Image (cartoon, rainbow, N blue to C red):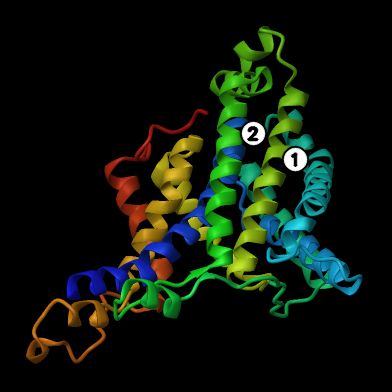
Amino acid sequence: MDILNALMVLVNFTVIPALAYGSQLALGAIFVTLIYAVLRFANFATGDMMSFGTMFAVLLTYYFQSKGLNFGVLPTALLTIPFAIFMMIAYMLLIDKFVFKYYRIKKSPPVQFAMVSVGVMFVTQALIRIIIGPSDRRFLDGEKFILKATEFKEMTGLSEGITLKSTQAITIVVTLIVVSIMFWFLNKTKTGTSMRAYSDNEDLALLSGIDPKRVVMITWIIAGILATIGGVLYGLDKSYRPFVYFNNMLPIFAAAIVGGIGNPYGAFFGGYVIAFAEIFLTYAYKRFIAYLVPESMEPNTLVQLLSTDYKFAVSFSILVIVLLIRPSGIFKGKTI
């Protein structure tokens, strides 16, 4: 029984949170890798674009709630996602038309695109501050828990229980659905094949009659969908703090590079690698070990490998190690 209790502690405090956090990182990492593969630059505005899309969902959620609209036991924010996606796509297409298109026509080097994306990042941050402000906002409603620890204990007779928040379950399920549809689109549709061909060899794709403008537009549309859904899921699970999304840029980029920059499958896998590494290395194992050793040997300290203050240092360390040992990532990168 003690071994089972120890496992429940581990599942409750590390595995479930890591699966939810990894799903959120995976969507952001696929956003990064898609832009890099097709448009050939590192978009440093990723985190703030996720925040921008979430901002619309937050505002629309408040509006829906004021009108008495809700989604029953599910968060009302899920109803706002299609509208937020539309606004996010419109914003991205405008940014591309008035900013990135100019540099694309000039065939500017990737580093110039990256610097331009930093400018876009600051503009997006300013717009967020003007529209909604920097304050922490909670917009979760509906049923908060699918399974409570007390209910799990009663069902199993164990001393330790498992708590499953609705936001965690929604995050994992929605991510799997969205990613499955996206992979199907990239591999099974004519448009997806065109995007892959354009990513692999732009000149050959143009000679084959592929319309580069359409490829670019579809890329931004998919990116807008991923950014908005990923941002909303993160905000529901934690809370909406606009500039925390900027801080998430490091683990998101780390996930994309660890998996293989330019490879969506690698980005998806990399999100979970980074999430599990961050959570397992910063979790305090005192309670877990107490079930596995005699009472006289129970630890007096937290038994924590790293403080939670060093969570982002874990992402950075993994990123550096992968770049030194396998620069192309776990999966071979640079193409869809």
Depth check, front residue: 116 or 216: 216
Examine the rendering and report whether any part of residue 239 can be seen. yes
Residue 119 in the image, given as x and y percentages of width and height: 71, 55
The kind of secondary structure element at disc 1 is: helix
Question: Mark 2 Cα within 10 Å, few/some/many (few <14, many 20+)?
Answer: many
In the rendered structure, the answer to whether residue 131 lies left or right of residue 115 reads: right
- Reading the image, the residue beneath label 1 is 100
For the point 64% across and 67% down, the residue is 236
Q: Point out the residue furthest to the top here.
A: 208
Of the two numbered discs 1 and 2 in the rendering, the one whose residue sits closer to the viewer: 2
Residue 172 in the image, given as x and y percentages of width and height: 52, 54
Q: Quadrant of the N terminus?
A: bottom left
Depth check, front residue: 139 or 222: 139
Identify whether 139 is placed above or below 181: below
Residue 173 in the image, given as x and y percentages of width and height: 55, 51
Mark sitting on residue 39? 2
Q: Earlier in the sequence, mark 1 or mark 2?
A: 2
In the rendered structure, the answer to whether residue 4 lies left or right of residue 259 reads: left
Depth check, front residue: 174 or 96: 174
Residue 300 in the image, given as x and y percentages of width and height: 19, 92
